[in-house]
Image (cartoon, rainbow, N blue to C red):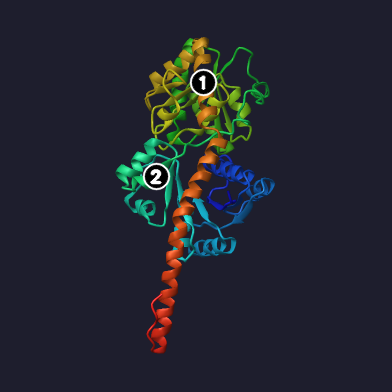
Amino acid sequence: MRPLTVLHALEKVSFATGSVWQMFEAARGLAQRGHRVLVATRPDAEMARRCRDAGLVHLPLAFWNEFDLYSMRRLAGVIRRHRIQVVHAHKGTAHAVALGAALFGARFGLIVNRGVSFPISQLASFKYRSPHVHRIVAVCEAIRRHLVDDVRVDAGRVVVIPGSVDVHRFSAAVANPRRVRRELRLPRAARLVGTVGLREWKGWKEVLQALPAVRAEHPEARLLLVGCESERQRAAVLRLAGEMGLADAVLPTLVRDDMADVLAACDVVVDASWAGTGTTGTIREAMALGRPVVATAIAGNGELVEDGVTGILVPPRDVKTLAAAISRLLRDGPLAADLARAGRDQVRARYSTATRVMRLEALYREVIREVGPLAIRRERVGRAERKAAAAAASGRRARPV
């Protein structure tokens, strides 16, 4: 098959963000399969370097906001100049700018990602129902249902392609958990519970509130909170832990880029999100590493984690049930091992980056087949309109096209 020319658009640039990793790994995977791939983000030296190393063309674009006419016009020019066949927009601003590029006359297939389960406002829903959006990629069935039932997007335009994991990077065979445990100065007998993300809706406070009950049964338990955005936030977390009498049991860290080692160092990995999530990337990564997981039963987590088979699901914001689930996995070694093994096998079979890239490639070709005839029709209509206008200006009647 002929190589494709694809542009991935995302305003964010921080590799501490799941959407950035998902975008970048898809772009890199497509390039490895022989396609020409451009990546449009806000200007960023690290993003430019990573793209260069991966054989991707990095396009710095302002992406000031959803009404950024300058970026719309510039993106339209890039699409024409590079003959982009498909634009895959991964967040709201990139989505709006790509729609603007279509209104500026660029012809391409537009695919939009939807990876969070926050409700879509009535105003934002017009972006998803736009005829210029050819497909929406939902990362889970729960998000697909919201788009179809609540946002009223045509069901035929919404496909489910889950987020993925680099199973080579997140592999117990290559991870180095001992280094992380030495860095954290953990006692040999310590049982480490890990959670990632300190935004309110990520549920880290609920995990912290569950810790006293966990430590009542497992005094050696420690809580690792990964993802403080600053030293100031880290200090605030330590103060809160101290007020709860947990100063020696809570280990908050800044954002890290060695997450495979970090998660492998944990005895249990928890995601207690109570809003927003699609399918939690941390849980996918922990499962790939063969670590037992506890997750809240919201959005797509129930599609990723089968309760009692590949992990344990708990109701959101239910601290008592959360504490009991964590304690159970720390207490019951055989159960934890069985769940971890089944979770690892599931992620490797269904959620690998290689699988996702192949599904995206097939989707891009499908959209290109649809958009091609449409582009030809538009070009013919455009020629006819220009000819009619020229004839009207000269007082002649145009010959039908």
Q: Amino acid at mark 2?
A: Val
Q: Position of residue 264 (x, y in %)?
A: 60, 23
| Viewer-side label of 2, 1 | 2
Can see residue 93?
A: no
Q: Mark 2 near mark 1, Cβ–Cβ under 8 Å?
A: no
Can see residue 82?
A: yes
The residue wearing badge 2 is 158
Of the pair 50 and 155, the residue shown nearer to us: 155
Q: Earlier in the sequence, mark 2 or mark 1?
A: 2
Q: Secondary structure at mark 2?
A: strand
Of the pair 152 and 44, the residue shown nearer to us: 152
Q: Residue furthest bottom?
A: 395
Q: Position of residue 212 (x, y in %)?
A: 46, 17
**Residue 291 marker:** none
The answer to whether 62 is drawn above or below residue 273 in the figure is: below
Please report the residue visible at 47 percent of the width from the left and 14 percent of the height from the top.
Answer: 327
**3D distance between C-alphas at marks 2 and 1:** 46 Å
Please report the residue visible at 42 percent of the width from the left and 89 percent of the height from the top.
Answer: 394
Q: Is residue 201 left or right of residue 265?
A: left
Q: Position of residue 127 (x, y in %)?
A: 39, 54
The residue wearing badge 1 is 246
Q: Position of residue 107 (x, y in %)?
A: 48, 61
Please report the residue visible at 52 percent of the width from the left and 63 percent of the height from the top.
Answer: 76
Q: Amino acid at mark 1?
A: Leu
